[in-house]
Image (spheres, coloured by chain):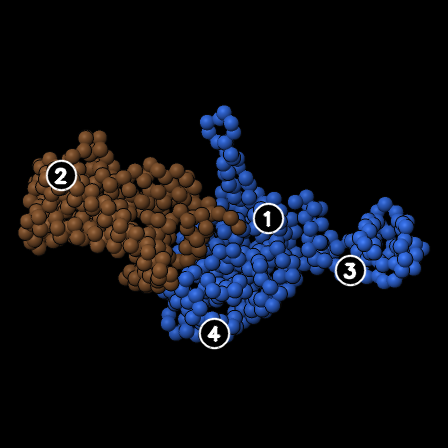
Amino acid sequence: MNTVKLYIRSMGMLLKSHLQYPLSFFMQTIAQLIMEGGEMLAVILIVNRFRQLKDWTGGNLFFFFGIMSVSFYITEFFGRGITGDFPSMVRTGRLDTFLVRPRGVLTQVLCGGIDPRRITCIAVGVAALVIGSRMSEVVWTPLKVLCFAESIAMSCLLILGLFMIEAIFCIHSVKSVELVNALTYGGRSACQYPIDIYPKPLRMLFTIIAPFALTLHVPAAWIMGKNLYGWPSWTAFVTPLSGVLVFGIMTVLFKQGIRFYRSTGS
Amino acid sequence: MSYIEVNGLKKTFTVRKKREKGKLLREKQTVEALKGVSFSVEKGDLVGYIGPNGAGKSTTVKILSGILTPDGGEAKVGGKVPWLDRKEYVKHIGVVFGQRSQLWWDVPIIDSFSLLKDIYRIPKTDYDNRLKELSDALQLEELMRTPLRLLSLGQRMRAELCGSLLHRPELLFLDEPTIGLDAVSKLALRDFLKWENREYGTTVMLTTHDMEDIAALCSRVMVLGHGKKLFDGKLPDLLEKFDTVRTVSVRYDSDVLRIDMPENVKCEHKGEEYILTYSPAEFPTSRLLKALQDAGNIREMTLQPENIDHLIASMYKEMDL
């Protein structure tokens, strides 16, 4: 439990650091709102123009968009150490200071970054979820709430896991990370829409390699009373676990990677 | 067995060269940072570790503090191998990097210390006592509520030291701790390190380019160059080997056309002043004085004090570093 306490205390301190520059913080938060609002506008336009995308209604589209936004930006909010700051931690040698402390490196990396500006993005996501769930006439049962929570948590772990690929490359001092961005940011952009509108190669990519379809689309479809791949309904509780699997694999690789770490400067 | 035992330590880095024209892949180059370094340090020693830039000093410190894994050789500190079981090992060491901070940039330093208490799992009463003691010794009382970024370099270094000693490490590594500090801060830092070493028997290993640090603090000095250990012993012994040259500056009443000097005396003419560099072993001082007097009426003359930096520079030169 001590690690959780450490994480919470670190978060408090980082929040304090961010608020040292209130104007900049405020402006950037607004900028985030405009950016994510724009993304949502795209969905609104599609819904207005087409009413339906394959078998998905407008409400369904909002729900998919919302669940992706909330998961992605919660991860960026709390996992900034991995999703944004890690390359600079390596470059500036901050990672060295983590290595001389008696705590796990990954723990310290996660304790070392927070991005509270994402709060507005999360808010947009929540709004989309509320609209989506109303329009899709979702009847919330305890089981559905559980499935929903699991889906968000597992998607967060999946996204964190995918960003860790970049971190692992970074430890080996390989700079080109565009390919990894295709999975993380590309995954977010693509998978905020239902997966079955895409051709097979893309579906395979986001089901097997970066399994957003398993952590997000399968449970979300079940919550809205539809069936994505024609799988039985209990799969809505099982497939999201792929998120923790990806995270687990990446954690092991990350720890291996740290052994090859070669540090910088004097 | 000594407290620190290092035997044949080796580390090689692979550096990518810039891509040459017409070649698809960049060539790799290996740089041997350490080519088999061995030494031992007793508990409670204050050891200086010097050498020109790129000699392998920081690499040694990084290996001994568990940041890097060596490619060959052995190292044990207090019976433990630093790079195995890192988490257990680093509980007992403290590290200060002169050029990077371990504290949080934007928050008051007291908040950083309090988070370090959680990171190292220091019991509350221990923490309170130790913080009081360190803040008295380092005069941090007044600065506790100030964010790190608003501190001067000297104040920041004091805060870094406090942060790295809160958990009472047995061994303290200092990587260029006095870099960029003013004279007063340097003196205060040295006094503090002596105090900590005397009071708690903390073993200190410091790398520096400032020879005054070594002269003031270290009972022992190791010289590293090109990844090899070149000298290990007391500072006076090191200096004796290279302290062979004297410098004299002379002013004359009137312009002097030339001074007759043999070739092994270097003679420079700067404004009104003549600066002569010679080795008493090769050219006796009395003969030098005679030659100077023969040249004209001496108005004033200074024997320049030995400059420790010059000595080290000539030592590096002699050792071909």
Corner quadrant of residue A161: top left
Residue at the image point whose x is 57% and y is 58% from the top: B179
Hue of chain B? blue
User: Distance from label 2 to label 1 (Cα)?
Assistant: 66 Å
* Label 4 SS: helix
**Marks 4 & 3 on one chain:** yes
Tag of residue B53: 1
Q: Secondary structure at mark 2?
A: helix
Residue A190 is left or right of residue B67, and the answer is left
Evaluate if marks 2 and 1 touch, with contact meaning CB atoms under 8 Å apart: no
Q: Tag 4: Cα neighbours inside 10 Å, few (<14), some, or many (≥20)?
A: some
The label nearer to you, 4 versus 1, is 4
What distance separates the C-alpha of mark 4 from that of mark 3? 42 Å
Closer to the chain start, of discs 3 and 1, is: 1
Q: Quadrant of residue B297?
A: bottom right
Q: Judge whether residue A234 can be spotted in this image.
A: no
The residue singled out by tag 2 in the image is: A49
Q: Residue under mark 3: which chain is it in?
A: B
